[in-house]
Image: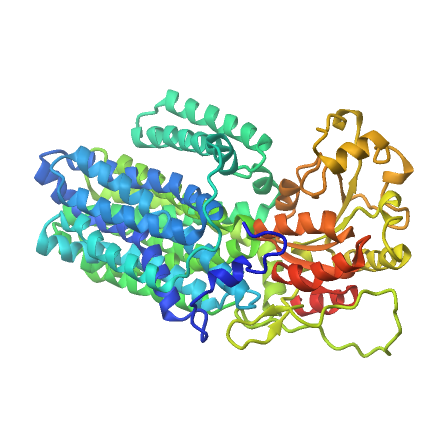
């Protein structure tokens, strides 16, 4: 990790060798799109190979369903796990490792001669392809922030959705073509050339992760990635899959195990320092949780048709795998077109409502499909589901990007896919139950009735979700995604002499734009911003020059937060009797304990009386220098409030400000530092940090800039 005086920031290192032109050019996005498409194409391409696999291995067609559920279960577990690992070890490393695993899986599947070997190949494919999407989301966000963009261009995120949604739908057609001409093994060996190309493009087009890998002790690593949380999540999902796979027989022990493990997982995650599945966030952030549920239910409906209709076409209508795949081609084309149209829109509510309506229309139309239905009519029904898949995937991904905390985007993106795979597992259970006694028209109609219920629920959820309307109003008025943020608007007020303000550094005080070399300051979204007022206590104020001036500036920042709806966090340092066991080699706090001048409950350690706390504010008592070393889980509290941006002010610059800023930067918060609301006992140390160190991790602004920056975000 770089030292305090190291000016080589992660942002600068990661972009070494990056193109000076469009930061989102083909060289960067091509491997991301290709890697992210590996999972959905493997999810769908197998659909047309199941009958052929059953014939080659001399097993019932129903037994091949495990090739679907095994990939879905693995992916449901691995998607958020890969996101968490990408946050911890670097998204490029995890992206490349995943593609390499897919390459190995393609070889294993191509050489397999038993169902067991094919299951192993599918598990490896699920694990490897799961790295693509969450790592790509992190890489895109990192590139946007480095380029000075408030958000990546809409077509970039849209392209990620389009490749995923389209490959799901065209997978059966591709599979039908390959399997019809080269046999069922093509569903596995096709991964070899595709993964090889993706690996080459990734190594050539994506800059290396800046920070070295830090494993630490096995215990520390397990804690950082919450290994026990991952295992509990995997156990509960496995038990749920066993229950669903047994339908229509009710496997009560499996259901009970799933519920018990889920409850145990929730209890563990509430206590975990860095939870894998942030239960507090899911409870507090209703918009994000509803997005997960809506996405899962929508994909459940889409996959029921994808698999159920494919089997019905091959068995009930007597079509070959190739013919069945061709019939689903219009579905894939319309998926891509719908995704492209929706990706160009800032609003998400009406696309999501249209998606739910189309899902209901398609489900209702399926009730009238039978053995005598003209093929053209069947194609029209599948086309409706193509529109649903394209619109829903893009819109839900957009909501996720808006609502998920920046520091946990990898895990949050993985969870979006996980809920989709849970829906896919459920769709396999629905299809298996409906066709339990044979593939027939009545079984297809049973599937359609389930779809009607699912689509009605999705429609009600979407129409009643008022957060979608609020989000649309907020984002419609913003500059287009990908546009560089304007700096502070020039003030029209007369210039006033303010000798107590700290003059901002004239160099390196704003983020460098990677394409033009100019500087830009990202706008502030107050709803996702927390103002941290740190160590504004009498015991600390007495040690800095001009305490009244810096305190007044802190008051101005507090007034801004109140007026604009930003979250407020008061941080103070104080020690109780329980904190007295400080080792002697801790020079700062051992002396503080001995002197007794940081004792909790005294007037000296209270937040200064001029900074009044309100009911919704968070007050954190810290027992070391950093704001994160506190009796309150500050990370969890910020996540629960959906905060991804911090505005820092505090005393002293070389103490709480330095340690908190560096830690927050490592956790990928967007950072703004109020230079005139920060001070240090040593003015020269303050100057060096402000001019030479902090600009590489944070935007250095003044309290006067806050109003203009927040206005730019509205």
Image location of residue 667, percent across then percent down: 57, 49
Image location of residue 306, percent across then percent down: 28, 50
Is residue 389 left or right of 589 when viewed as pictured?
A: left
Is 628 located above or below residue 15 in the figure?
above
> How many circles with numbers are drawn on the protein?
0
Q: Is residue 669 visible?
A: yes
Residue at image location 33% in from the left, 48% down from the top = 98
Is 86 located above or below residue 29 in the figure?
above
Residue situated in front as seen by the camera: 474 or 528: 528
Q: Is residue 464 visible?
A: no
User: Which quadrant of the figure has residue 454?
Assistant: top left
Residue situated in front as seen by the camera: 94 or 194: 94
Is residue 363 left or right of 148 when viewed as pictured?
A: left
Q: Quadrant of the C terminus?
A: bottom right
Residue situated in front as seen by the camera: 336 or 77: 77
Is 557 located above or below residue 636 in the figure?
below
């Amino acid at each position: 990790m770089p030292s305090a005086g190291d000016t080589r920031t992660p942002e600068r290192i990661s972009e070494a060798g990056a193109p000076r032109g469009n930061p989102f050019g083909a060289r960067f996005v091509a491997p991301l799109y290709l890697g992210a498409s590996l999972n959905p194409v493997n999810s769908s391409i197998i659909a047309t190979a199941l009958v052929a696999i059953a014939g080659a291995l001399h097993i019932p067609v129903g037994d091949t369903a495990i090739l679907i559920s095994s990939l879905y279960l693995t992916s449901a577990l691995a998607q958020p796990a890969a996101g968490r690992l990408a946050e911890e070890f670097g998204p490029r490393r995890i992206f490349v490792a995943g593609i390499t695993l897919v390459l190995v899986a393609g070889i294993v599947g191509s050489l397999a001669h038993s169902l067991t070997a094919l299951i192993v190949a599918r598990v490896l494919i699920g694990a490897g392809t799961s790295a693509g999407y969450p790592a790509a989301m992190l890489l895109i966000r990192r590139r946007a922030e480095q380029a000075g963009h408030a958000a990546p261009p809409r077509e970039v995120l849209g392209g990620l959705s389009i490749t995923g949604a389209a490959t799901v739908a065209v997978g059966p057609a591709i599979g039908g073509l390959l399997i019809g001409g080269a046999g069922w093994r093509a569903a596995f060996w096709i991964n070899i050339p595709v993964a090889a190309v993706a690996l080459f493009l990734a190594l050539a087009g994506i800059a290396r992760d800046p920070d070295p890998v830090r494993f630490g002790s096995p215990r520390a690593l397990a804690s950082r990635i919450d290994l026990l949380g991952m295992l509990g999540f995997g156990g509960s999902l496995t038990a749920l899959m066993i229950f669903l796979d047994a339908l229509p027989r009710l496997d009560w022990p499996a259901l009970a195990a799933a519920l018990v493990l889920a409850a145990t997982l929730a209890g563990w995650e509430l206590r975990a320092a860095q939870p894998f599945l942030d239960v507090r966030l899911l409870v507090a952030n209703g918009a994000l949780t509803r997005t997960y549920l809506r996405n899962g239910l929508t994909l459940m409906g889409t996959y029921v048709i994808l698999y159920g209709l494919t089997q019905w076409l091959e068995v009930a209508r007597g079509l070959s795998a190739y013919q069945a795949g061709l019939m689903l081609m219009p579905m894939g084309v319309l998926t891509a077109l719908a995704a492209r149209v929706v990706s160009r829109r800032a609003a998400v509510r009406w696309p999501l409502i249209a998606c739910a309506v189309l899902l209901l229309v398609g489900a209702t139309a399926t009730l009238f499909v039978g053995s005598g239905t003209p093929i053209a009519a069947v194609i029209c029904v599948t086309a409706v589901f193509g529109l649903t898949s394209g619109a829903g995937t893009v819109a839900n991904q957009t909501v996720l990007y808006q609502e998920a905390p920046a520091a946990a985007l990898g895990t949050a993106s993985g969870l979006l896919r996980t809920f989709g795979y849970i829906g896919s597992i459920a769709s396999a259970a629905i299809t298996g139950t409906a066709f339990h006694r044979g593939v027939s028209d009545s079984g297809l109609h049973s599937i359609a009735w389930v779809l009607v219920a699912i689509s009605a629920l999705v429609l009600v959820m979407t129409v009643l979700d008022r957060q979608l309307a609020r989000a649309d109003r907020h984002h419609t008025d913003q500059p287009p995604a990908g546009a560089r943020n304007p700096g502070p608007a020039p003030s029209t007020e007369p210039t006033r002499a303010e000798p107590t303000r700290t003059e901002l550094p004239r160099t390196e005080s704003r983020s460098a734009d990677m394409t033009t070399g100019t500087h830009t300051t990202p706008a502030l979204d107050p709803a996702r911003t927390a103002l941290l007022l740190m160590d504004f206590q009498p015991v600390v104020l007495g040690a800095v020059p001009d305490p009244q001036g810096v305190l007044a500036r802190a008051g101005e920042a507090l007034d801004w937060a109140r007026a604009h709806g930003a979250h407020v966090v008061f941080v103070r340092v104080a020690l109780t009797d329980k904190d007295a066991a400080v080792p002697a080699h801790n020079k700062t706090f051992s002396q503080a304990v001995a002197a007794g001048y940081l004792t909790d409950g005294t007037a000296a350690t209270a937040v200064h009386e001029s900074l009044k706390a309100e009911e919704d504010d968070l007050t954190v008592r810290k027992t070391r220098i950093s704001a994160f070393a506190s009796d309150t889980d500050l990370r969890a509290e910020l996540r629960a409030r959906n905060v991804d941006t911090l505005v820092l002010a505090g005393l002293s610059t070389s103490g709480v400000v330095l340690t908190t800023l560096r830690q927050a930067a490592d956790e990928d918060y967007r950072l703004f530092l109020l230079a005139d609301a920060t001070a240090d006992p040593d003015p020269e140390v303050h100057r060096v940090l402000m001019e030479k160190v902090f600009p590489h991790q944070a935007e250095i602004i003044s309290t006067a800039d806050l109003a203009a920056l927040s206005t730019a975000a509205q």
